[in-house]
Amino acid sequence: MIELLISISVFAVIVAVVSGVFITSLRSNRTSLALISANSDGQLAMEQMTRMIRKGQNFTVEEVDANNDFTPDYNELKYKCLRFRYEYAGKFITYRWNKDGKKLEASIVDSDPLNCNGSGGNGTEVFNEIVSENLRVDFANFRIVGQGGSFPLITIVLRVGAKNTLVTSGGQAFINLQTSVSPRNDDRY
Amino acid sequence: MVEAMVAMSIIVIGLLGVFALSSSSISLNRVAADRYIAVNLANEGIELVANLIDNGDTWNAIPGFDSSLTADYEMDFNDIKVKPLDGALRPLYFSKDGSGYYAYDDGDINLSLYVITTQDFTRIIRIENVGPTLDHIKVTSTVSWNAKNGSRLDFGVEDHFYNFKD
């Protein structure tokens, strides 16, 4: 009887440990795949934006401060926008980071581009998400150097991660991407 | 009892294998993430030079570039010219809680917001004239960083610019 009890106890402990490890492995694997996917999606978003920016001109950056006090505090940002005219189609493109949904969005209109807070336009245009729904865009930033009279340099920052990930890799659940683009159009023309 | 010990040992060894695989998988993801960062920073190095070429009045008039030499330079998006590499490579600081930018400490960034990352990203931009006519410039941008195992990894891109102005 005692041997049986000991055997059952040992077996139960082993099963519990094995189950725990198995579940942890599955979770790690899922997190790993999610992070790999997020990295890939983040890179894709970056490439998509740089491709369009390269053919753009008349760039402007706008931001909407959550507290409306216009202090240069990135923690208070609600929206950050990069707006430009897309050369070939003659359209206006606005890329917008939306803090509320941690989303990266775009609006493409023929004229009267939307303001960063979504107002303006002809009333029917909207911002649409441009990245995978599994991607979490923690932060985006845009900067223009050399605007006016020359070729501007547009710098883009994206901080992206996978939605619903608990385990972090190397202490980080996100990746910070930065690149700059030199558009091919002279802003003077 | 011996059978139980053997069985448990086999199970433990199996579990260790699973743990090792999980850990390795997470680490490899970090390697991939760092490479994505490096790819973008390296591309940026090329674009910075391209922007200087675009904005120059004449071909080859890249501010800070000595056209008689093949040399290594540093530059970030705050700069208006390339700066010759002087001594050791400098790290790109990262504004984790601020703008999210990677930039050099040239006195133009707020060091209370910027930190050096554990990856310690550095970038070399090499510019060289190709051929005798000075109508062809080769630019390579190489980013290196610390891997988790202590080694130093790097990623480089190369682009060629031709005289389309003069």
Image: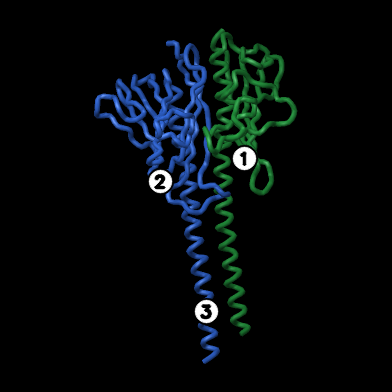
Chain colours: A blue, B green
Which residue bears the numbered disc 2? A134
Q: Are marks 1 and 2 in contact (CB under 8 Å)?
A: no
Under mark 2, the amino acid is: Asn
Q: Does B17 sit left or right of A109 as displayed?
A: right
Helix, strand or loop at mark 2: loop
Gap between marks 1 and 3 measured at Cα: 46 Å
Amino acid type at circle 1 is Thr
Element at label 1: loop
Cα gap from disc 2 to disc 3, whole angstroms: 40 Å
Please report, as a chain letter, where disc 2 is located: A
- In the displayed structure, B143 sits above or below A93; it is below
The residue that mark 3 highlights is A11
Percent x, y of residue B113: 58, 35
**Do marks 2 and 3 share a subunit?**
yes
| Cα gap from disc 1 to disc 2, whole angstroms | 26 Å
Q: State left or right for residue A63 relative to residue B4.
A: left
Q: Left of A7 or right of it: where is B6? A: right
Q: Quadrant of the C terminus of chain B?
A: top right
The spot of residue B53 in percent (x, y) is 57, 16
Camera-nearest label, 1 or 2? 1
Say whether disc 2 or disc 3 marks the residue closer to the N-terminus: 3
| Chain of the residue under label 3 | A
Do the residues at pointers 1 and 2 share their chain? no
Image coordinates of residue B62 in percent, x first then y, are 62, 15
Label 2 neighbourhood size at 10 Å, few (<14), some (14-19), many (20+)?
some
> Image quarter for residue A135?
top left
With respect to residue B1, does B47 lie above or below? above
Q: Nearer the viewer, residue B53 or A179?
A: A179
Task: Tell me the number on the disc at residue B117.
Answer: 1
Residue extending farthest to the left is: A123
